[in-house]
Amino acid sequence: MEHVAYTFISVFTLACALGVVLSKNAVNGAMCLLLCLAGIAGLFIQLHAYLLAFVLVLVYAGAVVALFLFIIMLLDMQGGQPWRFRGFQTAGGLISAALLIVGLDSIAIHGRTADAPPVAGAVGSSLRLYSYQLFTTYLLPVEVMGFLLLIAMLGVIVLSRRGPGTEGPK
Amino acid sequence: MKPSLDAYVMLSAALFAIGFLGVLVRRNTLVIFMCLELMLVAATLALVAFSRFNGTEDGDVFVFFILTVAAAEVAVGLAIIVALFRTRQTVQVDQLDSLKH
């Protein structure tokens, strides 16, 4: 049963990821990204990481994809650019992606991951343990992340101000 | 029958490769950005799977940080793209070649 669900969700996720790459229209790509993220949230739930599934939907689907759609709308790329086949670049991209898949999968197959059963107690599902980790072992990274978000916010404000040097409609 | 760790790692590798392909092949900056996000999410999937199959929560905590960094990155990146569009009126990477010569 779990295997059937896994197969279904993974095929769905891969198809949506291919949709992001192949869709001509950027809006369709963003929608495919949204569905792909929903599939990954489903996989997280299968892996008993309920909190992360929730956060993924909240941050990615709620904020990031909405931001993407907003920028696509702002820049008015409704028509999208035509999908032009460039032999050299496309072939290079395909070959390197295939090499990447082969390399990573050979690590997955020939590595020591083969016969590890999932551990009985799902640690990721316990919110208490999770937050305990965040506030003890990973306290410094949490602080650094907060600072990073502050810097990013300031950076975005500075970048999006219409300075004297920029052109465009006033 | 439960899916094995291999299944999750291979799915994550495939997702990462698809995102990588998109970064190499597409010419629209926004689509390239979306493919970058796809690669980040593929990495988080591998982290969560390893964390689950090893019985630790370190991977899960790292996913939290990756999500934070991704959110900050998207905000700054999109601001840069908008600033770029204001000055150059395009987001196609072929036409953004000021640093090429």
Image (cartoon, grey):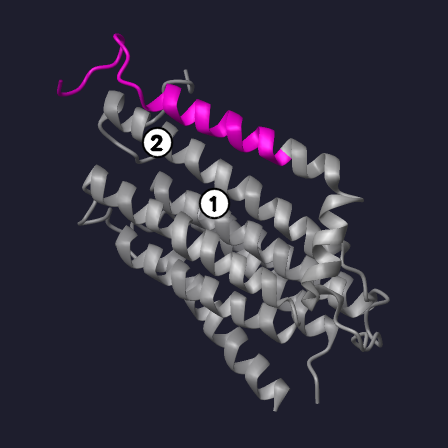
Task: Please tell me whether mark 1 sits on a helix, a strand or a loop.
Answer: helix
Q: CA distance from mark 2 to mark 1?
A: 18 Å
Q: Amino acid at mark 2?
A: Ile
Tell me the residue that label 2 is attached to. B81
Tell me the residue that label 1 is attached to. B24
Based on the picture, tell me whether residue A162 belongs to the magenta stretch.
Answer: yes
Q: Position of residue B16 (x, y in %)?
A: 57, 56
Of pointers 2 and 1, the one earlier in the residue sequence = 1
Q: How many marks?
A: 2
Above or below A85: residue B86: above
The segment highlighted magenta reads A145-170
Q: Chain of mark 1?
A: B
Q: Residue at x 70, y 52 (%)?
A: B61
Q: Residue at x 70, y 53 (%)?
A: A131
Main SS of residues in magenta:
helix
Location of residue A98 (image quadrant):
bottom right
Q: Chain of mark 2?
A: B
